[in-house]
Amino acid sequence: MGAHRQFSFARWDGGPIEVSKGILSGWPGFLVPDPQVIYATENLYDVGTIELIERAHVNWIWVTWSNGFSNQTEAPQQVLLRRYIEECHRHGIHVTAYVSIANIFWEDMFLHVPESRDWIFKINGQPVPYPAADYAAVGRVTRYMADLSLEAWQQYTLGRVISAVNAGADGIVFDNSISIYGR
């Protein structure tokens, strides 16, 4: 038998796109900005935070790779994460990339990926908003669900997954494939 290895896991949601997600979702600490929340979230992928992971005896984290903005908007986050993943690996920490499989921040996506207008999931002809945001606080719907059955959306998502693997991610976690799809 091989050696038994135990993993200690932590969610490590952060970076600039996580701040944008919090603001556009109306979440506490983001919509009315709490400077500590914003700073900590935006700077979570500074390599100095790896010491915190080690002190907590965590050896596997997930990072926010893609949460529904266009690839163009998410690119700076992913550049940051390439270096962070590399440094985590140097410290023996495994990294899983978080990919929101069905969330579309429609304003950004429509601007940068015009064909994404056709990727929105609809029920009775109406776009389905992402259900865990406080749109009343934001003043408008900022997130819609994608139609997972569309090949164009699948290919776009696959590109995100491939980029995470190419950046060194040890795993992928998919989120937001919720019950609305079970018609």
Image (tube, rainbow, N blue to C red):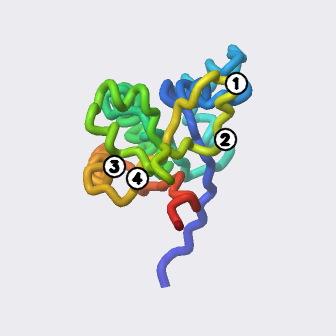
Q: What residue did someone put label 4 on?
A: 147
Amino acid at dot 1: Ala
Residue count near mark 2 (Cα–Cα under 10 Å), binned few <14, some 14–19, many ≥20: few
Callout 2: SS = helix
Q: How many marks?
A: 4
Amino acid at dot 3: Thr
The residue located at (63%, 20%) in the rendering is 38
Callout 3: SS = helix
Q: What residue did someone put label 1 on?
A: 137
The first of marks 2 and 3 along the sequence is 2
Callout 1: SS = helix
Callout 4: SS = loop
Residue count near mark 3 (Cα–Cα under 10 Å), binned few <14, some 14–19, many ≥20: many
Amino acid at dot 2: Arg
Q: What residue did someone put label 2 on?
A: 55
Q: What residue did someone put label 3 on?
A: 157
What is the CA distance from the residue labelled 2 to the residue labelled 3?
34 Å
The residue located at (26%, 50%) in the rendering is 152
Residue 142 placement (x, y as % from top left): 53, 30
Mark 1 touches mark 2? (CB < 8 Å): no
The first of marks 1 and 2 along the sequence is 2
Pair 2/3: label in front: 3
What is the CA distance from the residue labelled 3 to the residue labelled 4?
12 Å
